[in-house]
Image (spheres, rainbow, N blue to C red):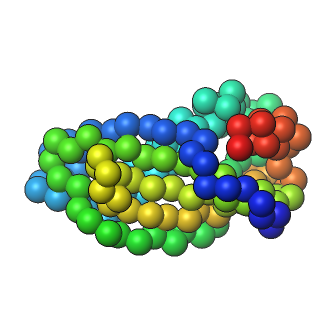
Amino acid sequence: MSAGFDSCVAFHWPVRVYWEDAGGVVYYANYLKFMERARSEWLRGLGFEQDELRRSAGVMFVVRRVEVDYLAPARFNDEIDVDVSVHAIGRASLSVKQTLTRGSTRLVSAQVRLACVDASHFKPVKIPTPILQALVQKT
């Protein structure tokens, strides 16, 4: 993987904690859902719909690895922010840092490695050039 990207926030997505998420406090796996949704919105913001990538380019991004630090709980009705920033870009993968915050309180920090794969065989493939260009322009 090629490093050299700073930790600037490439994308910011607000989310509210609803009762089904919490029942008091957010269940740890739900933070992964929040992060997934933010990455989908991030790609959409770059101009790439995941279903269209699969259909037209024959590729999709899959999670290869997640490292998560749970620092503080989110609770019912909290408004939290999910940030996505590029950490590193490789030939067939990229790594993003994600943070979930409530105001100035960091709730969760994560590093997510995504692999670009052929949608039919799930084998690693080169990230399409238009996506790489968009990633580099936004970081």
**Residue 88, above or below 43:** below
Q: Nearer the viewer, residue 87 or 36?
A: 87
Q: Quadrant of residue 59?
A: top right
Tell me if 33 is positioned left or right of 105 in this view.
right
Quadrant including the N terminus: bottom right
User: Closest to the observer: 137 or 122?
Assistant: 137
Q: Position of residue 56 (x, y in %)?
A: 80, 31
Which residue corresponds to the image point at 49% horizontal and 39% vertical from the top-left?
Answer: 12
Is residue 134 visible from the viewing direction of this image?
yes
Residue 73 image point, x, y percent: 23, 62
Residue 104 or residue 70, whichever sits in front: 104
Spot occupied by residue 11 in the image (x, y as percentages of width and height): 55, 39
Residue at the (38%, 62%) spot, across then down? 108
Asked which quadrant contains residue 71, the reply is bottom left
- Front residue of 51 and 80: 80
Q: Residue at x 51, y 55 (%)?
A: 98
Q: Residue furthest left?
A: 24
Residue in the picture at 16% in, 42% down: 77
Which quadrant would the C terminus be assigned to in this image?
top right
Give the quadrant of residue 134: top right
Compared to 75, does 48 lie above or below? Answer: above
In this picture, residue 11 sits left or right of residue 127: left
Position of 130 compared to 50: left or right? right
Task: Report if residue 51 is visible in the image.
Answer: no
